[in-house]
Image (cartoon, rainbow, N blue to C red):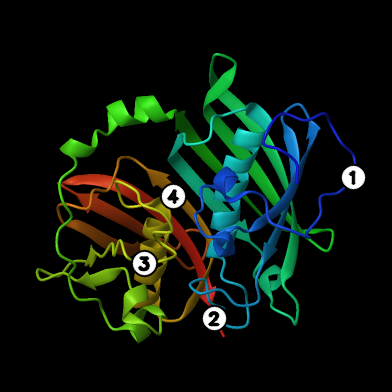
């Protein structure tokens, strides 16, 4: 396994024999690492290998397809990997995501009797540099299955090194988490276990309360001081299922405006947005301000 540092351009394809070091994708559990190799193909271009398992503890199949939210996680991990390995961003830095999207062809997500190997092309655009390292970055990603493009995505984020993050988010100023509200029925959001539900009934109606169970082994793979973006994407998916019934969220574009804190009610609401076909506009509001806004594209699953 190559060390996390800059490399010369290489021409061969990356391999699938082992995962990349988990620190490069900000994961504590090896089982949550989707990426297996990487190489630089040009100054700001990379090729990454990813493997999606046939079964995942949380990202379970949807109507015979791999969970599309694995595409979002692949975009996230690939963006972190190339930042650390290709641009020398120090390990331990925080990545504050401003926006993240994915769009996949549902037929490209079909499951078969093998794990799904993907080749991921990553194009980077450093937006701001500090000491030669990106402080702000955009990555554009294309996913290939068996040589055919099946999806794309992007991430735009700010990199904050550890000392700066400690000043930005001092631990003694973060309020303790509120008690968790009871979840909605798991089956109503396409889940089997109550522990995997991230929405609760709102006593006043007009949406749902966000549930952020910090003991969850996947959504909280490691300790964090605010609600992670992956949980907010899952909330958008579960809101879509509550509104529309069983659906495959084949596309999602999310803008993150501010942190969602563990203290204080965060309200999730959804409204139809049919401009480009069936879809929803899902927002998360906390303390009267929009914290995250997702546009979710869906089709019936099964």
**Residue 40, percent from left and from top:** 78, 35
Measure the alpha-carbon separation of dots 4 and 2: 22 Å
**Residue 87, percent from left and from top:** 64, 28
**Residue 37, percent from left and from top:** 74, 50
Mark 4 crowdedness (10 Å alpha carbons): few <14, some 14-19, many ≥20:
many
**The residue positioned farthest toward the right in the image shown:** 11
- SS assignment at label 2: loop
Measure the alpha-carbon separation of dots 1 and 4: 34 Å
Q: Who's the residue at 57% across and 41% down the image?
A: 80
Q: Are marks 4 and 2 in contact (CB under 8 Å)?
A: no
- Name the front one of labels 1 and 4: 1
Frontmost residue, 58 versus 201:
58
- Which residue lies under the disc numbered 3? 216
- Which residue lies under the disc numbered 1? 12
Which of marks 2 and 4 precedes in the sequence?
A: 4
- Which residue lies under the disc numbered 2? 301
- SS assignment at label 1: loop
Residue 242, by quadrant, is bottom left
Measure the alpha-carbon separation of dots 3 and 1: 38 Å
């Amino acid at each position: 396994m190559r060390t996390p540092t800059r490399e010369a351009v290489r021409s061969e394809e990356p391999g699938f024999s082992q995962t990349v070091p988990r620190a490069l994708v900000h994961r504590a559990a090896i089982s949550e690492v989707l990426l297996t190799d990487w190489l630089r193909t040009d100054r700001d271009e990379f090729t990454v290998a990813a493997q999606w398992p046939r079964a995942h503890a949380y990202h379970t199949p949807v109507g015979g397809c791999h969970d599309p939210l694995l595409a979002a996680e692949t975009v996230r991990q690939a963006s972190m990997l190339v930042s650390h390995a290709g641009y020398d961003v120090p390990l331990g830095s925080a990545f504050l995501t401003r926006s993240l999207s994915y769009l996949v062809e549902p037929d490209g997500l079909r499951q078969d009797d093998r794990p799904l190997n993907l080749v991921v092309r990553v194009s980077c655009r450093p937006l701001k540099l500090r000491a030669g390292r990106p402080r702000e970055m955009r990555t554009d990603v294309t996913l290939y299955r068996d040589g055919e493009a099946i999806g794309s995505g992007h991430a735009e984020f700010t990199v904050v090194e550890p000392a700066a993050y400690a000043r930005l988010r001092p631990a003694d100023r973060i309020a303790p988490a509120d008690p968790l509200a009871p979840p909605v029925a798991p089956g109503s959001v396409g889940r089997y276990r109550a522990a995997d539900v991230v929405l609760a009934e709102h006593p006043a109606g007009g949406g749902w309360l966000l549930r952020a169970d910090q003991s969850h082994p996947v959504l909280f793979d490691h300790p964090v001081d605010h609600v992670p973006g992956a949980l907010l994407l899952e909330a958008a998916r579960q809101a879509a299922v509550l509104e529309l019934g069983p659906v495959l969220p084949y596309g999602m574009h999310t803008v993150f405006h501010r942190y969602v804190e563990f203290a204080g009610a965060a309200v999730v609401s959804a409204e139809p947005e049919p401009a480009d076909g069936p879809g929803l506009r899902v927002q998360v509001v906390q303390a009267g301000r929009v914290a995250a806004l997702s546009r979710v594209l869906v089709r019936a699953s099964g």
